[in-house]
Image (spheres, rainbow, N blue to C red):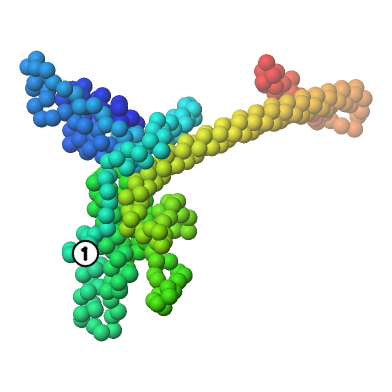
Amino acid sequence: MKTYTRQQLHDLVWSGPMREVAKTLELSDNGLRKHCVKAFVPLPPQGHWNKVHAGQKVKTSPLPPRPPGVSDTIQIGQWDYRQHQKELEETEPVAPVFDEPIENLRERVTRNIGVVLASKNLSPPHAAFRRQVEDDARKAAQSSWHTAIFSAALEKRRLRILQGLFYGLSRLDCSVTVQGQDTRTIYVNVGHQNVSIGLERVANRRRVPDEQAVERLKFSIFKGYDKNTERASWVDSDEQTLESQLTSIAVEIIVAGEMQYREHRTWVYEEEVRRREQMRQEAIRKKLEQEKAERERLLKLEADRLKRLTDSAEDYQRAQAIRNFVSAVIEVPTDDVDPVSIARWREWALQQADKLDPISTGRIWNDVNDGA
């Protein structure tokens, strides 16, 4: 697997015909096109290279700024764990750098998104939650036991706010996923990030002088997928309703997508640093273990060699003692034993001495060669 930046991929696809560039990357031209579209890298228009070959002047579309939440790196090919580990071992991880300050990004998004307004009605409901609304209405019509979820005024208001917000976000290519029959699980796709959001009734109620209960809504942007951790939130107030804050909410959702991307990049970098240090410590540990094992091996070799030396010396002394003993026995005159028996015994005894003797057997030379 190879990793390219958006700029590197842009330079590649504008360096030659798509099919030729794709071939160098071991991709089909359609596969390369998909990578470029996903990374928001502009492609040469149809007929571009024919004009180039004809000597006509052509323009190169510049690489646009990285959209919020979109990765600046493109990985082409199959990820290989061993290759990744090898690269991590050989190359120091590089800390991510984000050229555009978040405040500048916020200003850019604010300029581009325009004014976001809540929908005046739900005819028709937004595609993200249309199925849930229609299913709820159908069940309520078919059975008196089913209490319609979206018939209450607060629920209708909630959906109108979400609908207007979703349409506003779509201006900057943000899509939305709404899950659950009650539409309580919502993700906004910002670039390559899924931002979790929520719009719920505030738990506490306040009564106004006419005794009418005032129900308020709270909009939350969650950090990651943990709904217990809010990145930002807005609540209905006497001064400002959520409807009047939808533009800033939409902007902050997109900014949250970029922050989530940056946090992920930083986390990946920190994990790589941690993993590289772990690998370094593991390599040190293995080296120390190998050195220890080698020392123990050499000590054992030395101990074994010393034992063989002392054993050989003892065997030699025993062999010499047998030979001396045989000589002493032979020198003693006796008429009680047949000379033939004495000769056989002497031959046998000296053979035993030779078997014990490391010099006679040649065993000692093996030890000498081992120590050379």
Q: How many marks?
A: 1
Dot 1 amino acid type: Asn
The correct choice, above or below, for 221 with respect to 99 in the image is below
Q: Quadrant of the N terminus?
A: top left
Q: At which x and y percent is residue 259?
A: 41, 43
Residue drawn at (21%, 64%) of the image? 121
Relative horizontal placement of residue 23, taking residue 338 as reference (left or right): left
Q: Given the current orientation, which residue lies at the most extreme left position? A: 54
Q: Which residue is mark 1?
A: 121
Query: Residue 178 location, x and y as percent?
Result: 30, 60
Residue 170 drawn at (x, y percent): 24, 49
Name the quarter where the C terminus is drawn: top right
Q: Which residue is located at x 27 percent, y 44 percent?
A: 113
In-front residue for pair 198/107: 107
Looking at the image, can residue 83 be seen? no
- Which residue: 37% across, 41% down? 106
Q: Is residue 233 above or below residue 70?
A: below
Is 369 in front, or is 297?
A: 297
Q: Secondary structure at mark 1?
A: loop
